[in-house]
Image (cartoon, grey):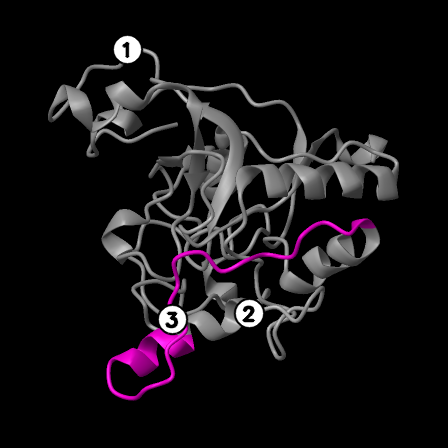
């Protein structure tokens, strides 16, 4: 886990034991989240900090960017039901997991960041970790939705060439994915390039997000990259996928 050619929060590379677990093949979609909203009365995702502008020119880009996030009460925007839910807080993700746990009568949760990274990088055929889910080749449009190419997440099931060995899709790009992990230093941490880069953020106040979003440069979206934010934030194009503990024979 981790990377040697990265900033201090990803260093040093170290070995982590992860028990058997399941992880969602896709991030939770808008349609799946809508079922939760309708069943529980939970507030639908709200636009925070995204302008709804109707004039032309550069402003038209902002209008297009905002369109996929405008819900009609408990219904997702038309044509986006299969897209990942986005602009949700950490607490929203937890609420969804609690509801789904009741529906399925088994514990559903957010993955830890170690689980997320193993799903995204581990290749059981070689026993090695990859830089990206698809391998070590740099990202391009055949692998992931990055770099503001489309100004919105792609539907679940897109980018089959970017699938991880475990079968999970779209772990890189589309939406930042909340994990259950607090931001903490890896064993043997040393501040670099300066102490304030990550060390001042360590602690339970911040939760780790993984994977990048459609708006992030491909340079920042390797499988080891750690983003973090307050659990109450929703403006970072954040979504999530679910996980649960267990082995296939006990599922």
Of the residues tagged 3 and 1, which is closer to the observer? 3
Distance from disc 3 to disc 2, alpha carbons, whole Å, reads 15 Å
Q: Earlier in the sequence, mark 3 or mark 1?
A: 3
Location of the C terminus by quadrant is: top right
Q: Position of residue 113 (x, y in %)?
A: 48, 31
Whether residue 124 can be seen here: no
Q: Which residues are magenta?
A: 40-64
Residue named by callout 3:
151
- Between 225 and 14, the one nearer to me in the picture: 225
Q: Position of residue 93 (x, y in %)?
A: 62, 42
Residue 30 is covered by the magenta coloring: no
For the residue labelled by badge 3, is the local secondary structure a helix, a strand or a loop?
A: loop
Label 1 Cα crowd, 10 Å radius (few <14 / some 14-19 / many 20+): few
Q: Is residue 35 left or right of residue 123?
A: right
Residue named by callout 2:
70
Asked if 154 appears above or below 119 in the picture, the reply is below
For the residue labelled by badge 1, is the local secondary structure a helix, a strand or a loop?
A: loop
Residue named by callout 1:
188
Q: Is residue 39 left or right of residue 194?
A: right
């Amino acid at each position: 886990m981790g990377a040697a050619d990265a900033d201090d929060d990803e260093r040093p590379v170290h070995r982590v034991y992860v028990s058997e677990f399941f992880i969602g093949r896709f991030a939770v979609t808008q349609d799946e989240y809508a079922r939760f909203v309708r069943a529980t009365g939970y507030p639908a995702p709200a636009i925070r900090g995204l302008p709804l502008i109707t004039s032309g020119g550069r402003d038209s880009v902002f209008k297009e960017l905002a369109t996929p996030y405008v819900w009609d009460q408990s219904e997702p925007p038309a044509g986006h039901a299969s897209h990942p839910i986005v602009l949700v807080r950490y607490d929203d993700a937890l609420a969804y997991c609690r509801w789904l746990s009741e529906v399925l009568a088994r514990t559903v949760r957010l993955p830890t960041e170690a689980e997320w990274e193993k799903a995204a990088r581990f290749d059981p055929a070689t026993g090695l970790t990859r830089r990206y889910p698809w391998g070590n080749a740099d990202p391009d449009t055949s692998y992931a939705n990055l770099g503001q190419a489309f100004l919105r997440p792609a539907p679940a099931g897109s980018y089959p060439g970017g699938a991880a060995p475990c079968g999970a899709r779209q772990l890189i790009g589309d939406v930042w994915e909340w994990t259950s992990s607090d931001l903490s230093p890896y064993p043997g941490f040393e501040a670099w390039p300066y102490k304030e880069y990550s060390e001042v953020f360590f602690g339970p106040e911040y939760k780790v997000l993984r994977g990048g979003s459609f708006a992030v440069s491909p340079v920042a979206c390797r499988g080891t990259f750690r983003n973090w934010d307050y659990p109450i934030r929703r403006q970072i194009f954040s979504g999530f996928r679910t996980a649960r503990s267990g082995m296939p024979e006990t599922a």
